[in-house]
Image (tube, grey):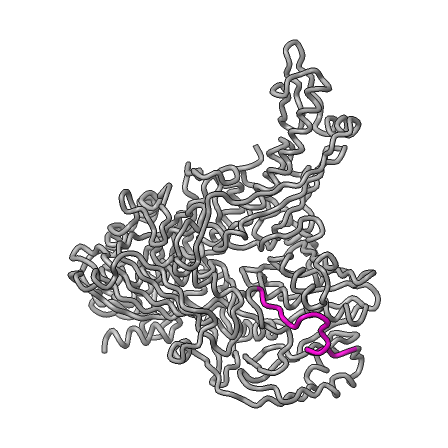
Amino acid sequence: MTVHRPHRHDSALKHATGQALYIDDLPEPPGTLQAALILSPVAAGRLRKLDLSAVAAASDVVTVLGPGDIPGKNDVAPVGQNEPLFASDQVSYAGQPLALVVARTLDAARLAADRAIIDIESADAILDIETALARKDFVQAPSTLQRGDVDSALKSAPYRLSAEFRVGGQEHFYLEGQVAFALPGEDGDIVVHSSTQHPTEVQHICARLLGCDYNRVTAVVRRLGGGFGGKESNASWVAGAAALAAHRTGRPVKLRLPREVDMITTGKRHPFLCRYTVGFDGEGRVLALDAMLAADAGWSLDLTPGVVARALTHTDNAYWIPHFRAVGYACRTNKQSNTAFRGFGGPQGVVVMEDALDRIARHLGCDPDQVRALNFYGEGRDETPYGQKVEQNHLPRVWAELHRDAEVERRRAEIAAFNRTSSVLKRGLGLFPLKFGISFNLPHMNQAGALVHVYTDGSIRLNHGGTEMGQGLFVKVAQVVAEVFKVELDRVRPSATSTAEVPNTSPTAASTGSDLNGWAAFEAANTIRQRMIAFAAEHFGAAPGEIEFADGNVRIAKPGSNQVLSFGELARLCHLGRVSLSSTGFYRTPKIHWDPVTMRGRPFFYYSFGAAAAEVAIDTLTGESRVLRADLVQDCGASLNPAIDLGQIEGAFVQGQGWFICEELWWDDEGRLRTVGPSTYKIPGSRDVPAIFNVRMLDSAPAIEATIFRSKAVGEPPLMLATAVWNALKDAIASAGQGQTAVRLDAPATPERILAAIAKLNA
């Protein structure tokens, strides 16, 4: 069996030896031009003048392109409209593209860009969520998810608490920055190599800018050097700018953004301001929740509607709340347009109940772990506020196994003893359970296509709509195809994702890559297999049920005969018999439906469950913190590839840890982002990985839904397990006081914020 076994990433050796080709490694044809952006230096205002004469006159500059040079529509919005590639009148954030310089060398393009004369009449900029809320300045109307009579339930609840906190944004910090390489062809055709998670959107945006049909543009993606959601929509306008330049010059054009420009121009994870009131009884059972989640959308819509919707549908997380109301605001600010990021609103949603339950436990003097378990979804308490049943509920199991593996009771006693005798260093232990829904919020996006060819030597070529960004999607889907034909994995060769081979694709996002593309590839491969079976049955005079594929061979198991031929030999016979050995495959996720107005339906095909425990230490004099140990249990169903999934769990957790602890974005009073590189923006390093890091997948837990070989998604859910770190930090801070006082700790929990929380605790 090829699936359910560990296989190394198909590009692992090439990654390690530098042989894996990224866009900047591709050979450049003679005459290739290089491009650089001209950016707005202010956050808000009216563009009175943009003088590009000195830019155009600079050495080696071929052309300078602005809004008037776009033959199609100056709009790169992934959703809605009115997100110009180049601002022509109003400037909406510092870093917004105004024009593009195209030159013979990269240095020439970047030097020339600095010569632009920009005259902007500044306007008042909105730089925080509170101002946008006060002005009611939103990129979309507020959304409300509600069940029951919240006001009455809160009024009659024995206890009520209200609180407020915020979680920050997060830079994607993919190793390969935004880059696109556009090569013009004949009759207006153009091929765009893009570091994108969404080749079809690249195709559409390029065609929109050029004013041509989609069939003129081919988007090609062999691999990305990381994406994390940051290349779902942002990559499209970068590709569009390169395509525009190639179209105007008739020559290949490459646009690569240096790290500083990448961070200045592109959106991040949405910061959220959260306020809530929770009603509960004397045992800690939640009776009602009234929550407000305000997202900083940045200057435009982008993918904010989906982020807010997922945040609202994950505010309940693992907990049954009979009376529930969550209102989501998408606040317009004069900052980069925030976008998709691993978790897509889920991380910002689940923290609400975690903060609430921690406060409830400390208010009542209860064990916070018991309060969490008391509120889990369970029998008779299994319907979410949006009307979906929580099926195959692994919450009790992952919680119990985590307690066992992490030795929670013993370690809590040890930590308490340590804190009693340590006045400077304090330790804390935090636990976190997770229920995360898998599917795109928009039902129509839950579809995928694939193309499989079997050659007459038995080798197989695979293409599908998913993109490989290091997460192991290509090898997983190849395993599916190998399993269908019962051949060795190395007989299946994945090829670069291309809109010319598989059209109308959904982005590789929402943790659906293997679910969608795996099934599409299965359907394509199985179609060919059935043709081969039918031919073999006729050719050898056997029944279809007597044709068996195994170990790279095909056995004709009819009575009185046991003929065996290789898979390649049967492929040759099928070709001679004029049997097609090529097929497309298509898959659409069943059962899902969603009404965005009433916010009711079944938005998710299934749920992924998990649990984590984290132990931290803080220095009460400096505010520094360290994650000492983490124990994770993650539900992956029947994992397609345990080696790949293990790496995904570990990486996601550390990325989530960075969001909660150290990754702080900072804008100055004029709206200019100042954390624009690794010297000022702190991503986790190797020494930030917990010294004791125990990760395992839930055993014997195949998905009950018809997922591909009963596996489950793994890309996003483990990131939220890092919420245990946030809980642990609050536990450690509380120990600096009397231990029973809840603390406000905004994320990221930088040393300054930890010190402020301690000071407030002891004020």
**Number of numbered callouts drawn:** 0
Compared to residue 732, the image places residue 400 above or below, namely above
Which residue does the image show at 63% across and 26% down from the upper left? 549
Determine if residue 410 is in view: no
Determine if residue 404 is in view: yes
Residue 555 in which image quadrant: top right
Say which of 677 and 478 sits in front: 478
- Location of residue 13 in the rendering, given as x and y in whole percent from the top left corner: 65, 49
Say which of 232 and 301 sits in front: 301
Which corner quadrant holds the N terminus?
top right
- Location of residue 390 in the rendering, given as x and y in whole percent from the top left corner: 36, 46
Q: 448 left or right of 142?
A: right
Magenta: main secondary structure equals: loop
Q: 358 left or right of 703?
A: left
Does the magenta segment cover residue 66? yes
- Location of residue 320 in the rendering, given as x and y in whole percent from the top left corner: 29, 52
Which residue does the image show at 67% across and 71% down from the upper left? 73
Compared to residue 195, the image places residue 257 above or below, namely below
Compared to residue 426, the image places residue 106 above or below, namely below
- Location of residue 761 in the rendering, given as x and y in whole percent from the top left corner: 25, 73
Q: Which residues are magenta?
A: 63-78
Which corner quadrant holds the C terminus?
bottom left
Q: 483 left or right of 341?
A: right
Q: Residue furthest top?
A: 560
Which residue does the image show at 56% across and 52% down from the upper left? 471
Does the magenta segment cover residue 718? no
